[in-house]
Structures are given as C-alpha cells and as structure tokens.
Amino acid sequence: YEEKPELADDEWMEKLESLKEMDFPFYQCSWIGGEPLLRKELIDRGMKYFKSNLVATNGTIELPHWPDVNFYISVDGKKEMHDAIRGKPETFSNLCKTIERLFTLREQYPNLRLRVHSVVTPQNVGEIKATIDFFHKKYQLDEHSLEIVRDLSMLGAHHDSPERQAIADQY
C-alpha cells in the first residue's frame, strides 16, 4: 500500500473489464472512502458496470448530475458537532447547501431520494436524535441511516471494564 496507495482510473477499468469477461455478476457498487467525488471521472466511467450505484459523500463538493446514482450525505451531528468532528469550519453549512440543491431537483427528478447517513460514536451519541429530527424536519428526508460504532478500544477501556460497559450502555 505504501508503494502504490491506489489504482489509477485505467487500472480500475481494466479490472472491471476482466471481471465482466468472466461473467462476474455485477449488481451494486458503493463508492465510498475518503471523499469519492474527488475521483468523479473514475465513478463516471465505472458506474456503467453496475445496475445500482451509491456514492457516500461528505456533501462539500457539488454533486454531479447522475440521475441513476443514489447519494448519501454524511452527517456527524448538528453544526458545532459536525464541524468539530470533521475538523474544518463550514463543512456543515456546505453539506446543507448540497442537500438544498438536491431538494430543489425533486420536482424535476421524482425518483430522487434525499438520504443522509450518520455514524454514531461516543463523541456524537448525545445529539443523534436531535440531528435526525433537524434533518427530517428541515429537508423532509427519505432516509436517515445510522451506523453505530462500538469499537471502544480507542477510548482505552478494557473489554470487560465498567468504563466500556458505561459507554456501550449509551447506545
């Protein structure tokens, strides 16, 4: 990985073509990790191999016009929490602008679904309900999915410690 951290777009296309030649049953691709829209060209070229494509994005980059792609906007909490977790001011405002742009496209594209995704961590668990309520009321979301992180080793708690149990009880 250190020598060659990621494949070039053409290398990805070669791999997808070789799988296609082997009658690989392509169905869905989830374009995730970091910010996938930094490699729009790869997604644009690669999505034709799949019946369904999902892009999980932080919402700070303008979304391309891909009507057959499902977008999930990552939300870590309300403004202060989200910006703190992301380590950069205005990320919350930028993702809200992205959702607002999507919202205005719903009339033109009736199949467009507004979805956000939150990873629940010890840092944001206390305001997840408020986050869900905020986004549902403000944007009439179709979906707000949750992923619960229970790897508490980062907090220094031993597997059977009272500290770890207390944190897990919050979930």
Image (cartoon, rainbow, N blue to C red):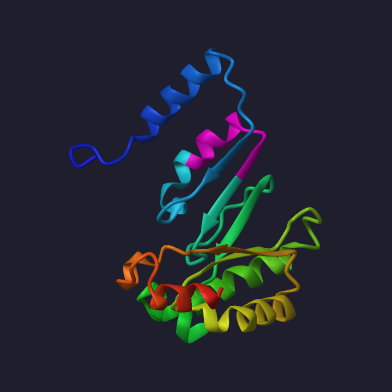
Residue 33, position in %: x, y?
43, 52
User: Which stretch appears magenta?
Assistant: 43-53
Left/right placement of residue 152 relative to residue 54 reads: left
Compared with residue 153, is residue 165 higher up or lower down, i.e. above or below?
A: below
- Camera-side residue: 51 or 9? 51
Report if residue 52 lies within the magenta region.
yes
On-image quarter of the C terminus: bottom right
Which residue: 49% across, 78% down? 124
Residue 22, position in %: x, y?
53, 13
Q: Is residue 19 visible?
A: yes
Left/right placement of residue 151 relative to residue 68 reads: left
Which residue: 50% across, 72% down? 168
Compared with residue 143, is residue 22 higher up or lower down, i.e. above or below?
A: above
Residue 117, position in %: x, y?
59, 64
Magenta-drawn stretch, dominant element (helix, strand or loop): helix
Report if residue 117 lies within the magenta region.
no
**Which image quadrant is residue 52 in?**
top right
